[in-house]
Amino acid sequence: MKHTTRLRVNIDNRVVGELGVDRRGRIHFQYDTSWLKTGFDLSPGTLPFNDTVQLSPEPQEFNGLHGVFTDSLPDGWGMLLMDRAFLQLAKWQRNEITPLDRLAYIGSRAMGALSYEPAIPLSASSDRVDIALLAKSATQLLEGETPEVLRQLQLQGGSPGGARPKLTVALSESSEECLSGFNELPAGFTHWLVKFRSQEDPQDIGRIEMAYADMARIAGMDMPECRLLKVEFSDRIDEYFAVQRFDRESSTRYHLLSLAGYVYADYRLPSIGYDTVIKATRQITGNMGEAEKAFRLMVFNVLTHNKDDHAKNFAFLHRSGEWVLSPAYDLTFSTGLNNQHTTDIAGSGNPQLSDIKRLARDCGIKRWKEIVEQVSVTTERWADFARQRGVSVVEIKRIESELEKIAHRVLRVS
């Protein structure tokens, strides 16, 4: 098996451009002339929309790739699956796998609309997906074992980002039937992302994230449809959090650009503030209403102790010819680094109301006080949302205690 040195980048079977490697090992990209005439800018302001050959401006942080193409690669869980696949296919160790090799492995399975050719051929034995079997296999893999259905696990779980094990699947309206989602969907099926537990997660993690999704929707957030999937094992019944994919609508794929890919921010470490999130949102969408959505997301994250709010947890969609802030995702109780927000608020990792006010003023958010009040009234009801979703009393009280501390710190007169 040879390393990949050239890849066509496509959207909806149209050539967008080409990625290649020069003699010095540097990755370059060039838009296709036909795409320049009839297509759109993949990353406005950070990937010039012209016919020049463009090297990535940040080779170290993004492994030589341009930010928008780095978004097609997974991290954490997906990389573990991919590394195992290359070890089986080519006997390559992690350090031998190039970024273009990884994109060829992803092929048409990337999140968003981009696909890459020629792709490394991968196939599953069946279009049917057994979530219980794959959940068990994910646990085995995390424990260092080699599961029997590794190939299907690599196919269904090798493209989403994040540290927790995930699957991309197609679910029926009742959630009773599950398909791979890589072929044309039968009537009544839609695209979903299913999350399993990591080794560090509490037993209730799926129910907790579902309660957070309910709370976010009532707090005025733009949320995709979410479900809890009951999965039966021989010795127990688990509930997994599932979210409908907002980058898919039937056979339509929407181009997705993370904030990390847009501004070349390292999502692994604290590298940006919410001023960057809000100003970038206004810049790429040209819409102050979208910037307010980003501010509301910030307030929700602060008041709900969602501190793993890194640069890949904000994204933009290109839909119907315009850019919009994506629906919110990865909303759950988390501690971040050193129990501080990964994305700071006016320089603070644990902000007070004065920090929120200062950021609102700097970003031109005039309705900031109204938004804070709307979100706070909802997040005060955490226990109600959690009980409705069957979260254990222990977890309800644990999270409620932390949320009360935040409310006291943030919402007191300052």
Image (cartoon, rainbow, N blue to C red):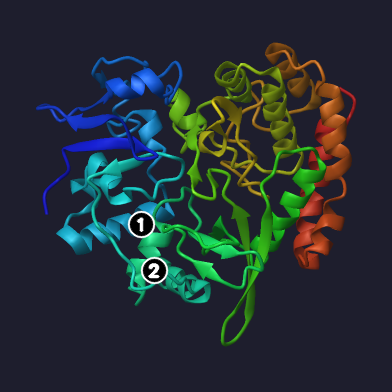
At a point 65% along the width and 40% down the height, the residue shown is 328
Quadrant assignment for the C terminus = top right
Q: Which residue is at the front of the view, 390 or 223? A: 223
Q: Residues within 10 Å of mark 2 (few under 14, many from 20)?
A: some
Q: Position of residue 382 (x, y in %)?
A: 83, 51
Q: Looking at the picture, does residue 385 appear above or below residue 266? A: below
Q: Which kind of residue does numbered mark 2 sit on? A: Leu
Quarter residue 276 falls in: top right
Q: Position of residue 380 (x, y in %)?
A: 87, 45
Q: Which residue position holds label 2?
A: 141
Q: Label 1, label 2: how many angstroms apart (C-alpha)?
A: 9 Å
Asked whether the residues under the numbered discs 1 and 2 touch, taking CB atoms below 8 Å apart as contact, a structural biologist would say yes
Side of 206 relative to 64 (left or right): right
| Residue 81 % position (x, y) | 35, 59
As helix, strand or loop, the secondary structure at mark 2 comes to helix
First reached walking from the N terminus: tag 1 or tag 2: 1
Which dot marks residue 41? none
Which residue position is annotated with label 1? 80
Relative placement, left or right, of 3 versus 403 is left
**Horizontally, is 101 left or right of 144 in the view?**
left
Looking at this view, name the residue that lies furthest to the bottom.
234
Residue at 52% x, 32% y is 270
Asked whether 402 or 372 is in front, the reply is 372
Classify the position of the N terminus by image quarter: bottom left
